[in-house]
Image (tube, rainbow, N blue to C red):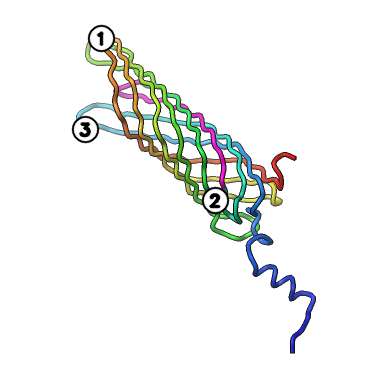
Amino acid sequence: MLCACPGSHVLAQDNSGDTLTTPFKKGRWLSGLGGHFSSNTLRLESEEGLISSNSYGLEIFTGTFVRDRWFLGFNVLAGSSEGAGLVERRSETLLIGPSVSHYFMKEPYGSLYVSLLPGYIRIREEGSVTNETDSYVQLAEGPGFSARIRLGYAYVISRRIVLDVGVGTNLSWLDLNYQSEIEAINRKESIFSNATFFSFGFNVMLDEFFF
C-alpha cells in the first residue's frame, strides 16, 4: 500500500539533483574581484646573498553556471612583480582568457573547487644588472600562452555573497624580445615560467546578469 504523504514529493525533489541544495545552480551568474600574491627567496651556492621576488595582482571575472556546479567564465588579470639580488627587476603582466571551474560539494554553505584558466599573456620587464665595474639596464617584452590552475574553497553567505581563498600555479610559455644598453642588436628568447601563488576573492552571485 502506497502512502501519499505531503513530504514524499519534496524528498523526491531533493534526491533528483543538486538544484535545491547547492547555491552553484545552472543559470546563475557569478562575478567578482580577486587578488593574488606570492613571495620567493633563492640562494645560489656560487654567489653571496639572496635573490628575492614578490608578486601581486588583481583579477576581474564574470560568467555563468552551464550546469549545476560547473562554471564557465571570462577573466582579466593584471599583475606586477619586483625582484632583488643579482638582478634588480620590475615586471608587469596582463592575462586574458576563459575559465572553467568545478565545485565538488553539494552543500549550501560552500564548496571546494578547482579552476583552469588558459589564455593570452603579455609581459613587460625592466631589469638592472650590476657586475664588478658597470651597471646597465635590460628591457624585455613579448606575448605568450599561460595556463593558470587553482584549488580553492568558496564560502557562501546568504546564497548571494561568495568569499573564496585558494592556492595555485601559473605555467607560462613566452617569446620575449630583449634590449640591452651594452648590446648593439636585439635578441629574442623563448622562456618557460612557473610560479606558485595564493589568492582571495569577493564575489556576487545573481539569478540574472544585472537585469
Is 52 rendered above or below residue 179?
below
Work out which quarter of the rendered image holds the N terminus and state it: bottom right
| Residue count near mark 3 (Cα–Cα under 10 Å), binned few <14, some 14–19, many ≥20 | few
Q: Is residue 139 left or right of residue 47?
A: right
Horizontal and vertical percent position of residue 21: 66, 61
Dot 2 or dot 3, earlier in sequence: 3
Horizontal and vertical percent position of residue 39: 41, 34
Work out which quarter of the rendered image holds the C terminus and state it: top right
Is residue 32 found inside the magenta-colored segment of the image?
no
Q: Nearer the viewer, residue 157 or 99?
A: 99
What residue did someone put label 2 on? 153
What residue did someone put label 3 on? 45
Q: Is residue 52 left or right of residue 22?
A: left
Dot 1 or dot 3, earlier in sequence: 3
Q: Secondary structure at mark 1?
A: loop
Is residue 80 found inside the magenta-colored segment of the image?
yes
User: Rounded to the nearest whole Å, what is the CA distance between mark 1 and mark 3?
Assistant: 32 Å
Horizontal and vertical percent position of residue 203: 63, 42
Q: Nearer the viewer, mark 2 or mark 3?
A: 2
Amino acid at dot 3: Glu
Q: Which residue is at a point 31% across and 31% down the rendered structure image?
A: 191
